[in-house]
Image (tube, grey):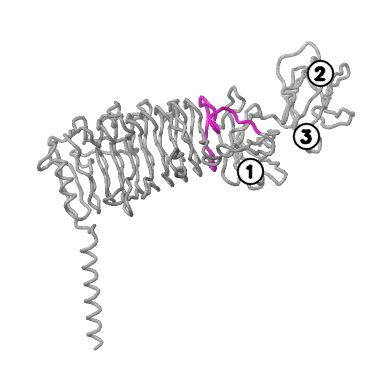
Amino acid sequence: MEESKGSSTLLLFICILLTLILLVPGNLNGATFTVTNTNDAGPGSLRDAINSANGLAGHDIIDFNIVPPGLQTIVPLSQLPQLLDPAGVLIDGLTQPPGGSIGGNPPATLNLLIEIDGIGAGMSCGIWIKSDSNTIQGLIINNFEKDGISIEAGPQQNTIENHICWNIIGLDPPGLGPKGNGRVTTSLWAGVRIHNVPAEVTSIAHDNYIEENLISANYAEGVAIIGPQVPGDVYGNYVIGNYIGTDINGVADLGNIHEGVSLCEGTHDNLVDDNLISGNDYDGVGIQGYNNEPYPAPPIQTSLNTVSNNIIGLDINLAPLPNNFHGVAVGEYGPTQWGCADINQIGPYNIIAYNGGDGVAVWEDAINSFNADENLITQNSIYDNNGLGIDLQNNGVTFNDPADPDSGPNQELNFPMIDSAMLSAGMTTIMGTIDINTSPTSAVVEVFKAIPDPTNFGEGEIYLGSTTPNAASNWSVVVSGLSSGDSITATTTDINNNTSEFCDNMPVLVSGVDESSEEKPMRYSLSQNYPNPFSSVTRIEYAVPKTTHVSLAVYEVSGRLIRVLVDGVKSPAYYTVSWDGRDNNGGKVSSGIYFCRFETKEYRTAKKLILIQ
């Protein structure tokens, strides 16, 4: 009885297993189809290999063995078959004899031997993926009228876990000259486009990887991740390790005609990481939504995307190779404004420099007061852009307002105020305040070595560190890596991840030591402090024509001593000292009129200082 029961159980298990094998569309018994010629159709052609792979269940391989060995160009005369097998296919251009190579540092070291040239294909894209688990590698794809590679989810099935790696898309085989895809400019095509068309259940494009490709000279975008059209979704895709907008050496401008990478119209949770994105005719990276006017529907928000570790606006050697508009545009697309991009993260570790507009621009549409909020901009190196380093609403410096009541992109968060930056024994103590309308103890102030610009709100080139203010909104941080005369700047990020613009620059001064020049003056003098009035730190210059004891101190109007700045013997020179609005005990004094008194045995004078907190 027990043996009969065990046999029945085993038979039932075998039946279930066989049923599953028959029902699962992607069993592992795929085949290899070899492309042996450059013909458009017929046995041994790429078209025939794709049709054969579509017709056979299982994960297939398409390899190449075209005689003679070396570079071969396939010129399709119409659209190549879509990739439809649910189990996917590997199309491997690296197999062409004597063997293509990715080298040790792709894409800079790619040496590829299979070119697919769309010059005769009409309104076609190069490779059209409409299934899961495909890998496209080692191909040169150029001259198509539509996308170089299209990954499209739709009525047939989702497009998940597709890998686009080690390809040259939009350039010639050496990777040095333009042969862009998207030649018919009536629509916004791309070198690689991930998108969907509406369909129940099966219109999801996610976990697709675009890795270590050279993607340049395409119309409109290098990489476009678009959507979703509902029902459906486009999310969780990866753009990693590519050169986008340059030649294969990473130094020449072969920009895509619009943006290097475009994340738009509701796509979310994508990662753009470790790419070189330079030379593009619009922005390096764009993140845009759509206000949906005049339709009776809420705005389409593009959210939760991360842009990190990229070089944007420079060549691979960090020389200037600007994108024509912004380095990263949140809510903008080249010369146009879209808004509706929130909860994105720019950073850490991007280098964003030399771009034609701002380093990072954030623009909000007028449809509401929160569609471009909560965009975190953190721990980047931003410098020498033609506009501001960070620009909220792309309208120049957004000055602080008391208690920070305004709205706008990132709520137009007030930037921090730096009161002093004093260098002592190789460490710089930086002190300041914030004035925001959320809890100061939940905010973060990031401090940077600055490259000054004409606005005096210069950009943050080197991230130095961060700190959290106290309940009174005061903050301080001690950092290394600065010298006397360097400039610093800072940003505030509030509890909701709204990040401010960079604040006005502050010079680093030597704590307790006044700076002197070698030039010897002819007479005693005390110059008017600068700036005056001031809100954080002011500089005071004085001259000593001979060696003598000098006293320089700040007093209230009543005559009460506030701060001793100099008390000692000075040799002949011009000197500069700073006052940070604090008394001898380190406490901040209140706004008002003060006097700086300069005294020697032979000379006495004073200047009026106006402090505005």
Q: Main secondary structure of the magenta part?
A: loop
* Quadrant holding the C terminus: top right
Few, some or many residues within 10 Å of mark 2 (<14, 14–19, 20+): few
Magenta range is: 373-400
Task: Give how far across and how far down residue 42 sits, in percent.
Answer: 10, 41
Q: Nearer the viewer, residue 374 or 592?
A: 374
Of the numbered discs 3 and 2, the one sitting upstream in the chain is: 2
From mark 3 to mark 2, how far is it between C-alphas? 29 Å
User: Measured along the vertical axis of the image, is residue 71 above or below residue 26?
Assistant: above
User: Measured along the vertical axis of the image, is residue 150 above or below residue 546?
Assistant: below
411 horizontally vs 75: left or right = right
Q: Quadrant of residue 577?
A: top right
Q: Which residue is mark 3?
A: 582
* Quadrant holding the N terminus: bottom left
Identify the residue at image location x=23%, y=34%: 123
Q: Which residue is mark 2?
A: 547
From mark 1 to mark 3, how far is it between C-alphas? 21 Å
From mark 2 to mark 1, how far is it between C-alphas? 43 Å
Residue at the bottom extreme, as displayed: 1
Task: Say if residue 307 shows up in the picture.
Answer: yes
Does the magenta segment cover residue 610?
no
In this rendering, the label closer to the viewer, 3 or 2: 3
Few, some or many residues within 10 Å of mark 1 (<14, 14–19, 20+): some
Of the numbered discs 2 and 1, the one sitting upstream in the chain is: 1
Residue at the top extreme, as displayed: 522
Q: For the residue labelled by badge 1, is the local secondary structure a helix, a strand or a loop?
A: strand
Q: Which residue is mark 1?
A: 467
Task: Give how far across and how far down residue 453 sits, in percent.
Answer: 58, 24
Instruction: Identify residue type, mark 3.
Output: Arg
Identify the residue at image location x=70%, y=33%: 420
395 horizontally vs 611: left or right = left
Instruction: Identify residue type, mark 2.
Output: Thr
